[in-house]
Amino acid sequence: MEIEKVKNALTMIERKATSLSDYQRRVLNDLKRTVPYQAGCFTTVDKDTLLSTGAVTDECIEELHARLFENEYRQEDLHSYKALVASNSRAAALRQAMQLNNKTCVRWQQVLRPAGFTDELRVVVMKERECKGFMTLFRGHQHPFFNDEDEEILSQLSQTIAEGLENIENQLSLSFQEKPTEDTGVLTFSEKIELMAGNERGTMWLDKLRERENIQGSRLVPRPIRAICSAATASLKNKRVMMRLRGEAFLKLEATPLIVDKKIISLAVLIQRAERDAIFPYLINLYRLTNREREVLEKVMKGLSTKEIATACYISPYTVQDHLKAIFEKTHVTSRRELVWKFR
């Protein structure tokens, strides 16, 4: 197999995708031709917390998610996503690791094997040292175990898939709101992450999150909420994640465990539009602006002219123009006006 052909196919998928979830779904479907599997899940994550911001999941493993989240956040086990991100590995097969290291795996014994799966391949979707998401592929009795070749293929595809995610993120339309409090949604969940109550705004955001992941009905909880609640339950501390939806502002989700007599009785989840100050560093990182480009951008946002920026930064006006050209290319705009709108 020529890995470059697979990468080219993934690039075409990126161009055809209409949203992040559409891209995730298309990537999973295309990978079946390269590394066959029975079921799969593709999750985007918050780069700072590594908590889910949305996933596309095959229906046959949907019911396993609660136990998989519990395993990830509350149990020490083989190939946790956090450990894979910290390692030099980009892909890791479960049964092969169990055999090589003579170790048992709680996840395989208690979750995967009872569900009829014989092996699991985890992939961290990385661009350089930044994690964009996770992919998990499952095999049943009709397939052999994952092997070194499967790991190597997915490792080589990791950055291409990550770049696709980043490019689609860059194309998402943005709208910011300086005073997010009026949009705050409040939801409460049981310790088992079952919805108990919520205000009108919270219910609205919950529906939008379900729509993003193509979740039908009101029973299943979207992965970003499930992730922060699972992490909050495991640590007994607040956990938060920031994400965005097409055509919407950035959202900040935060889960708080409510405790009585050292026991969690419920979890409160707040969902609101993120303030501009919280969004700005995220966008700087997203568009990979250098420190000098960030400095020039901040001056542009204040309305300074090229000459004023040059004086403030101790550089020539020509150098300012060079930095602006680089910023325009990275942020996909053609004028200062568009640039200000995008970051405001």
Image (spheres, rainbow, N blue to C red):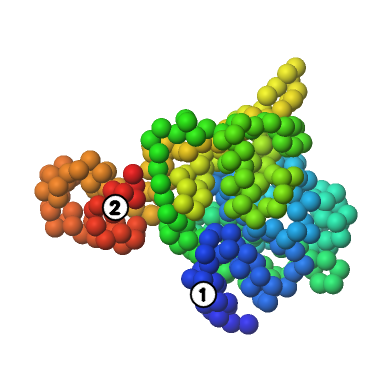
Residue pictured at 57% horizontal, 69% vertical: 157
- The correct choice, above or below, for 203 with respect to 328 in the image is above
On the rendered image, what quadrant is the C terminus found in? top left
Picture disc at residue 53: none
Callout 2 crowding tier (Cα within 10 Å): few <14, some 14–19, many ≥20: some
According to the picture, the residue beneath numbered tag 2 turns out to be: 339
Determine whether, in the image, residue 96 is placed left or right of residue 281: right
**Disc 2 residue type?**
Leu
| Residue 160 seen in the figure | no
Determine whether, in the image, residue 163 is placed left or right of residue 224: left
**Disc 1 residue type?**
Met
Image position, residue 103 (x, y; %): 81, 53
Q: Nearer the viewer, residue 289 or 152?
A: 289
Residue pictured at 52% horizontal, 32% vertical: 184
Element at label 2: helix
- Toward which corner of the image does residue 238 lie, by quadrant? top right
Residue pictured at 54% horizontal, 55% vertical: 132
Image position, residue 305 (x, y; %): 14, 47
Q: Nearer the viewer, residue 106 or 287?
A: 287
Pointer 2 or 1: first along the chain: 1
Callout 1 crowding tier (Cα within 10 Å): few <14, some 14–19, many ≥20: few
Determine whether, in the image, residue 277 is placed left or right of residue 243: left
Q: Residue furthest top?
A: 261
According to the picture, the residue beneath numbered tag 1 turns out to be: 12
The number of callouts visible is 2
